[in-house]
Image: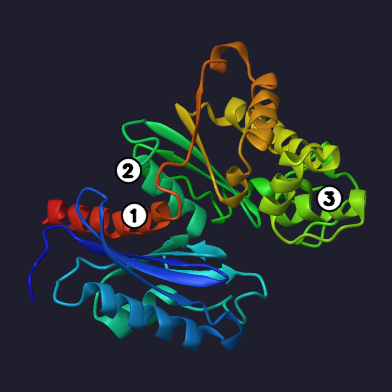
Protein backbone atom coordinates (compact mmCIF):
# COMPACT_ATOMS: atom_id res chain seq x y z
CA UNK A 1 0.00 0.00 0.00
CA UNK A 2 1.11 3.56 -0.70
CA UNK A 3 0.49 6.35 1.81
CA UNK A 4 -1.02 9.20 -0.20
CA UNK A 5 -0.16 12.17 1.99
CA UNK A 6 -3.21 13.62 3.68
CA UNK A 7 -5.81 11.75 1.66
CA UNK A 8 -9.21 10.66 2.96
CA UNK A 9 -12.31 9.06 1.52
CA UNK A 10 -15.40 11.23 1.17
CA UNK A 11 -18.82 9.59 0.81
CA UNK A 12 -22.12 11.19 -0.21
CA UNK A 13 -25.19 9.06 0.62
CA UNK A 14 -28.19 10.37 -1.28
CA UNK A 15 -31.68 9.10 -1.86
CA UNK A 16 -30.90 7.85 -5.38
CA UNK A 17 -27.15 7.31 -5.52
CA UNK A 18 -24.15 6.91 -3.26
CA UNK A 19 -20.76 8.27 -4.33
CA UNK A 20 -17.32 7.80 -2.79
CA UNK A 21 -14.09 9.54 -3.74
CA UNK A 22 -10.49 9.63 -2.64
CA UNK A 23 -9.76 13.27 -1.78
CA UNK A 24 -6.28 14.75 -1.51
CA UNK A 25 -4.95 17.29 1.00
CA UNK A 26 -6.02 20.20 -1.21
CA UNK A 27 -9.58 19.05 -1.78
CA UNK A 28 -8.91 17.51 -5.17
CA UNK A 29 -10.74 14.37 -6.27
CA UNK A 30 -8.30 11.58 -7.11
CA UNK A 31 -10.80 8.92 -8.07
CA UNK A 32 -14.46 8.12 -7.53
CA UNK A 33 -16.99 5.27 -7.60
CA UNK A 34 -20.79 5.34 -7.61
CA UNK A 35 -23.70 2.95 -7.10
CA UNK A 36 -27.45 3.33 -6.79
CA UNK A 37 -28.49 3.74 -3.15
CA UNK A 38 -30.52 0.68 -2.09
CA UNK A 39 -32.68 2.88 0.12
CA UNK A 40 -35.69 0.58 0.20
CA UNK A 41 -33.51 -2.34 1.34
CA UNK A 42 -32.57 -0.80 4.67
CA UNK A 43 -29.38 0.15 6.55
CA UNK A 44 -27.46 -3.10 6.06
CA UNK A 45 -27.70 -2.80 2.28
CA UNK A 46 -26.84 0.90 2.32
CA UNK A 47 -23.75 0.38 4.48
CA UNK A 48 -22.65 -2.61 2.38
CA UNK A 49 -22.82 -0.32 -0.66
CA UNK A 50 -20.71 2.29 1.11
CA UNK A 51 -18.13 -0.34 2.05
CA UNK A 52 -17.77 -1.51 -1.56
CA UNK A 53 -17.31 2.05 -2.77
CA UNK A 54 -14.76 2.89 -0.06
CA UNK A 55 -12.73 -0.18 -0.92
CA UNK A 56 -12.91 0.66 -4.62
CA UNK A 57 -11.55 4.20 -4.29
CA UNK A 58 -9.08 3.47 -1.47
CA UNK A 59 -7.52 0.46 -3.19
CA UNK A 60 -3.74 0.60 -2.82
CA UNK A 61 -3.71 3.58 -0.45
CA UNK A 62 -3.87 4.27 3.28
CA UNK A 63 -6.54 6.93 3.70
CA UNK A 64 -6.71 8.82 7.00
CA UNK A 65 -10.31 7.81 7.36
CA UNK A 66 -13.79 8.03 5.90
CA UNK A 67 -16.00 11.12 6.01
CA UNK A 68 -19.69 10.71 5.24
CA UNK A 69 -22.32 13.21 4.23
CA UNK A 70 -25.74 11.62 4.52
CA UNK A 71 -29.33 12.58 3.95
CA UNK A 72 -31.18 12.94 7.25
CA UNK A 73 -30.55 14.63 10.58
CA UNK A 74 -27.25 13.34 11.96
CA UNK A 75 -25.80 13.53 15.46
CA UNK A 76 -22.38 14.80 14.36
CA UNK A 77 -20.71 13.63 17.57
CA UNK A 78 -21.86 10.00 17.57
CA UNK A 79 -22.62 9.60 13.86
CA UNK A 80 -26.10 8.25 14.62
CA UNK A 81 -28.96 9.13 12.27
CA UNK A 82 -31.56 11.00 14.34
CA UNK A 83 -34.24 11.16 11.66
CA UNK A 84 -34.64 10.52 7.94
CA UNK A 85 -37.31 10.33 5.27
CA UNK A 86 -38.84 7.08 4.09
CA UNK A 87 -36.63 7.19 0.97
CA UNK A 88 -33.97 5.55 3.17
CA UNK A 89 -35.96 2.85 4.95
CA UNK A 90 -35.19 2.44 8.68
CA UNK A 91 -32.20 4.80 8.34
CA UNK A 92 -33.20 6.66 11.52
CA UNK A 93 -31.38 5.17 14.49
CA UNK A 94 -28.51 3.74 12.43
CA UNK A 95 -25.11 4.19 14.14
CA UNK A 96 -23.33 4.95 10.86
CA UNK A 97 -20.03 6.05 12.38
CA UNK A 98 -19.67 2.99 14.60
CA UNK A 99 -20.71 0.47 11.98
CA UNK A 100 -18.57 1.88 9.17
CA UNK A 101 -15.57 2.16 11.45
CA UNK A 102 -15.96 -1.54 12.36
CA UNK A 103 -16.39 -2.47 8.68
CA UNK A 104 -13.45 -0.44 7.32
CA UNK A 105 -11.07 -0.38 10.27
CA UNK A 106 -10.72 3.38 9.74
CA UNK A 107 -11.76 6.50 11.65
CA UNK A 108 -15.18 7.71 10.45
CA UNK A 109 -16.98 11.06 10.73
CA UNK A 110 -20.61 11.60 9.70
CA UNK A 111 -22.64 14.77 9.08
CA UNK A 112 -25.74 15.84 7.17
CA UNK A 113 -25.09 16.09 3.42
CA UNK A 114 -25.73 19.86 3.21
CA UNK A 115 -23.14 20.46 5.93
CA UNK A 116 -20.71 18.37 3.89
CA UNK A 117 -21.48 20.49 0.81
CA UNK A 118 -20.85 23.67 2.77
CA UNK A 119 -17.51 22.45 4.09
CA UNK A 120 -16.42 21.51 0.59
CA UNK A 121 -17.30 24.91 -0.90
CA UNK A 122 -15.69 26.71 2.05
CA UNK A 123 -12.50 24.65 1.69
CA UNK A 124 -11.91 24.29 -2.03
CA UNK A 125 -14.88 25.79 -3.81
CA UNK A 126 -16.69 29.05 -4.44
CA UNK A 127 -16.07 30.35 -0.90
CA UNK A 128 -12.45 29.29 -0.49
CA UNK A 129 -10.66 31.76 1.76
CA UNK A 130 -13.82 33.24 3.26
CA UNK A 131 -14.03 33.42 7.06
CA UNK A 132 -17.78 32.71 7.13
CA UNK A 133 -20.01 31.02 4.57
CA UNK A 134 -23.74 30.47 4.27
CA UNK A 135 -24.44 27.54 1.95
CA UNK A 136 -27.90 27.12 0.43
CA UNK A 137 -28.83 23.85 -1.27
CA UNK A 138 -32.07 23.77 -3.26
CA UNK A 139 -33.06 20.60 -5.06
CA UNK A 140 -35.58 17.99 -3.93
CA UNK A 141 -35.54 19.89 -0.65
CA UNK A 142 -34.19 23.18 0.69
CA UNK A 143 -31.30 23.09 3.13
CA UNK A 144 -28.61 25.40 4.47
CA UNK A 145 -25.40 25.32 6.46
CA UNK A 146 -23.35 28.01 8.17
CA UNK A 147 -19.56 27.54 8.29
CA UNK A 148 -17.30 29.82 10.31
CA UNK A 149 -13.51 29.46 10.47
CA UNK A 150 -13.83 26.06 8.82
CA UNK A 151 -16.32 24.76 11.40
CA UNK A 152 -19.98 23.93 10.82
CA UNK A 153 -22.55 25.36 13.20
CA UNK A 154 -24.67 22.29 13.96
CA UNK A 155 -27.00 23.82 16.54
CA UNK A 156 -28.00 22.45 19.93
CA UNK A 157 -30.04 19.59 18.43
CA UNK A 158 -28.17 19.02 15.14
CA UNK A 159 -30.97 20.57 13.09
CA UNK A 160 -29.32 23.91 12.26
CA UNK A 161 -29.70 24.69 8.57
CA UNK A 162 -33.24 23.45 7.96
CA UNK A 163 -34.09 26.55 5.95
CA UNK A 164 -36.81 24.67 4.08
CA UNK A 165 -38.86 24.46 7.25
CA UNK A 166 -39.23 28.13 8.08
CA UNK A 167 -42.53 29.89 7.29
CA UNK A 168 -42.87 31.45 3.84
CA UNK A 169 -45.75 33.71 2.85
CA UNK A 170 -45.82 32.28 -0.68
CA UNK A 171 -46.33 28.77 0.74
CA UNK A 172 -49.32 29.62 2.92
CA UNK A 173 -51.66 26.64 3.10
CA UNK A 174 -49.41 24.42 1.01
CA UNK A 175 -48.44 21.06 2.60
CA UNK A 176 -44.79 20.42 3.40
CA UNK A 177 -43.10 17.01 3.42
CA UNK A 178 -42.57 17.40 7.19
CA UNK A 179 -46.34 17.21 7.71
CA UNK A 180 -46.92 20.90 8.42
CA UNK A 181 -48.05 23.62 6.03
CA UNK A 182 -46.69 26.93 4.82
CA UNK A 183 -42.99 26.07 4.88
CA UNK A 184 -40.47 27.38 2.33
CA UNK A 185 -39.78 23.91 0.95
CA UNK A 186 -43.42 23.64 -0.11
CA UNK A 187 -42.93 26.41 -2.67
CA UNK A 188 -39.18 26.66 -3.40
CA UNK A 189 -37.95 23.07 -3.76
CA UNK A 190 -37.82 21.39 -7.17
CA UNK A 191 -40.86 19.12 -6.61
CA UNK A 192 -42.85 22.10 -5.31
CA UNK A 193 -42.08 24.13 -8.43
CA UNK A 194 -43.16 21.18 -10.57
CA UNK A 195 -46.37 20.82 -8.56
CA UNK A 196 -47.19 24.49 -8.96
CA UNK A 197 -46.63 24.27 -12.72
CA UNK A 198 -48.97 21.27 -12.90
CA UNK A 199 -51.64 23.21 -10.98
CA UNK A 200 -51.36 26.16 -13.35
CA UNK A 201 -51.27 24.22 -16.63
CA UNK A 202 -52.76 20.77 -15.96
CA UNK A 203 -49.54 19.30 -17.34
CA UNK A 204 -47.59 16.92 -15.08
CA UNK A 205 -43.80 17.38 -15.02
CA UNK A 206 -41.20 15.73 -12.81
CA UNK A 207 -38.13 17.80 -13.67
CA UNK A 208 -37.54 21.54 -13.27
CA UNK A 209 -35.47 21.45 -16.47
CA UNK A 210 -38.62 20.55 -18.39
CA UNK A 211 -40.23 23.73 -17.05
CA UNK A 212 -37.13 25.66 -18.12
CA UNK A 213 -37.50 24.33 -21.65
CA UNK A 214 -41.16 25.37 -21.69
CA UNK A 215 -40.21 28.85 -20.49
CA UNK A 216 -37.56 29.13 -23.19
CA UNK A 217 -40.24 28.21 -25.73
CA UNK A 218 -42.35 31.13 -24.56
CA UNK A 219 -44.53 29.71 -21.79
CA UNK A 220 -45.47 32.54 -19.41
CA UNK A 221 -46.75 29.99 -16.85
CA UNK A 222 -43.40 28.20 -16.85
CA UNK A 223 -41.43 31.41 -16.43
CA UNK A 224 -43.85 32.50 -13.71
CA UNK A 225 -43.47 29.43 -11.48
CA UNK A 226 -39.67 29.52 -11.80
CA UNK A 227 -39.70 33.15 -10.71
CA UNK A 228 -42.10 32.46 -7.82
CA UNK A 229 -39.93 29.67 -6.47
CA UNK A 230 -36.84 31.85 -6.84
CA UNK A 231 -38.40 34.83 -5.09
CA UNK A 232 -39.60 32.72 -2.17
CA UNK A 233 -36.13 31.27 -1.67
CA UNK A 234 -34.41 34.62 -2.09
CA UNK A 235 -36.57 36.35 0.51
CA UNK A 236 -35.79 33.63 3.05
CA UNK A 237 -32.07 33.70 2.31
CA UNK A 238 -32.04 37.48 2.65
CA UNK A 239 -33.51 37.10 6.12
CA UNK A 240 -30.90 34.47 6.98
CA UNK A 241 -28.14 36.85 5.86
CA UNK A 242 -29.47 39.53 8.19
CA UNK A 243 -29.45 36.98 11.02
CA UNK A 244 -26.01 35.44 10.43
CA UNK A 245 -24.04 38.12 8.52
CA UNK A 246 -21.87 35.73 6.48
CA UNK A 247 -19.02 36.93 4.30
CA UNK A 248 -20.29 35.03 1.26
CA UNK A 249 -23.39 33.06 0.27
CA UNK A 250 -23.05 29.99 -1.98
CA UNK A 251 -26.15 28.63 -3.69
CA UNK A 252 -26.11 25.11 -5.10
CA UNK A 253 -28.36 22.17 -5.87
CA UNK A 254 -30.30 21.00 -8.89
CA UNK A 255 -32.72 23.93 -9.09
CA UNK A 256 -29.80 26.34 -9.71
CA UNK A 257 -29.57 24.66 -13.12
CA UNK A 258 -32.78 26.52 -14.07
CA UNK A 259 -30.52 29.46 -14.91
CA UNK A 260 -31.32 33.17 -15.01
CA UNK A 261 -35.10 32.71 -15.16
CA UNK A 262 -34.77 31.44 -11.60
CA UNK A 263 -31.54 33.06 -10.42
CA UNK A 264 -32.39 36.68 -11.25
CA UNK A 265 -35.71 36.75 -9.29
CA UNK A 266 -34.04 34.82 -6.45
CA UNK A 267 -31.15 37.26 -6.09
CA UNK A 268 -33.39 40.29 -6.51
CA UNK A 269 -35.72 39.10 -3.71
CA UNK A 270 -32.70 38.29 -1.56
CA UNK A 271 -31.22 41.76 -1.91
CA UNK A 272 -34.59 43.39 -1.27
CA UNK A 273 -34.42 42.01 2.29
CA UNK A 274 -30.88 43.09 3.16
CA UNK A 275 -29.88 45.66 5.72
CA UNK A 276 -27.74 48.47 4.25
CA UNK A 277 -24.47 47.16 5.67
CA UNK A 278 -24.92 43.78 3.96
CA UNK A 279 -26.03 45.19 0.59
CA UNK A 280 -22.76 44.32 -1.12
CA UNK A 281 -22.57 40.69 0.01
CA UNK A 282 -21.26 38.18 -2.51
CA UNK A 283 -23.89 35.67 -3.64
CA UNK A 284 -22.36 33.03 -5.90
CA UNK A 285 -23.17 29.73 -7.51
CA UNK A 286 -21.62 26.51 -6.23
CA UNK A 287 -18.26 25.83 -7.87
CA UNK A 288 -17.81 22.16 -7.00
CA UNK A 289 -21.35 20.92 -7.60
CA UNK A 290 -21.91 17.43 -6.22
CA UNK A 291 -18.17 17.07 -5.56
CA UNK A 292 -18.52 19.58 -2.73
CA UNK A 293 -20.07 16.97 -0.43
CA UNK A 294 -17.24 14.53 -1.14
CA UNK A 295 -14.56 17.13 -0.43
CA UNK A 296 -16.34 18.41 2.67
CA UNK A 297 -16.87 14.95 4.12
CA UNK A 298 -13.20 14.12 3.59
CA UNK A 299 -12.21 17.42 5.20
CA UNK A 300 -13.96 16.34 8.41
CA UNK A 301 -11.60 13.39 8.69
CA UNK A 302 -8.48 15.34 7.73
CA UNK A 303 -9.25 18.03 10.32
CA UNK A 304 -9.86 15.43 13.04
CA UNK A 305 -6.60 13.71 12.11
CA UNK A 306 -4.69 17.01 12.25
CA UNK A 307 -6.16 17.99 15.62
CA UNK A 308 -5.32 14.59 17.09
CA UNK A 309 -1.68 14.95 15.99
CA UNK A 310 -1.50 18.46 17.43
CA UNK A 311 -2.68 17.13 20.81
CA UNK A 312 0.07 14.55 20.78
Dot 3 or dot 1: first in sequence order is: 3
Residue 26: give x, y in percent of width and height: 22, 48
Q: Nearer the viewer, residue 262 or 119?
A: 262
Relative to 243, say whether 179 is above or below: below
Neighbour tally class for label 3: few under 14, some 14-19, many 20 plus, Cα within 10 Å: many
Name the residue located 12 percent from the left edge and 63 percent from the top edge. Answer: 4
Residue 276 figure quarter = top right
Q: Secondary structure at mark 3?
A: helix
CA–CA distance in space, label 3 to label 1? 35 Å
**Which residue position is annotated with label 2?**
123
Residue 158: give x, y in percent of width and height: 54, 56
Residue 151: give x, y in percent of width and height: 38, 44
Neighbour tally class for label 2: few under 14, some 14-19, many 20 plus, Cα within 10 Å: many
Q: Nearer the viewer, residue 284 or 72?
A: 284
**Which residue position is annotated with label 3?**
197
Residue sticking out furthest to the left: 2
**Which residue position is annotated with label 1?**
295
Residue 198 figure quarter = bottom right
Amino acid sequence: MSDVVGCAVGVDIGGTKTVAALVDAGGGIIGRAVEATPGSDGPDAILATVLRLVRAVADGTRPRGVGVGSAGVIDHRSGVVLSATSVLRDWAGTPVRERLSDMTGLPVRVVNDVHAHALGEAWAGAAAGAESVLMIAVGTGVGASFVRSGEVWFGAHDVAGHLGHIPAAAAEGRPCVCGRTGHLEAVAAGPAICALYAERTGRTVTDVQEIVRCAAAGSAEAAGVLAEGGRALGAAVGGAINLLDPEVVVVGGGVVGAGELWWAPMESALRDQLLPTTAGIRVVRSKLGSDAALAGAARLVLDADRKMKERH
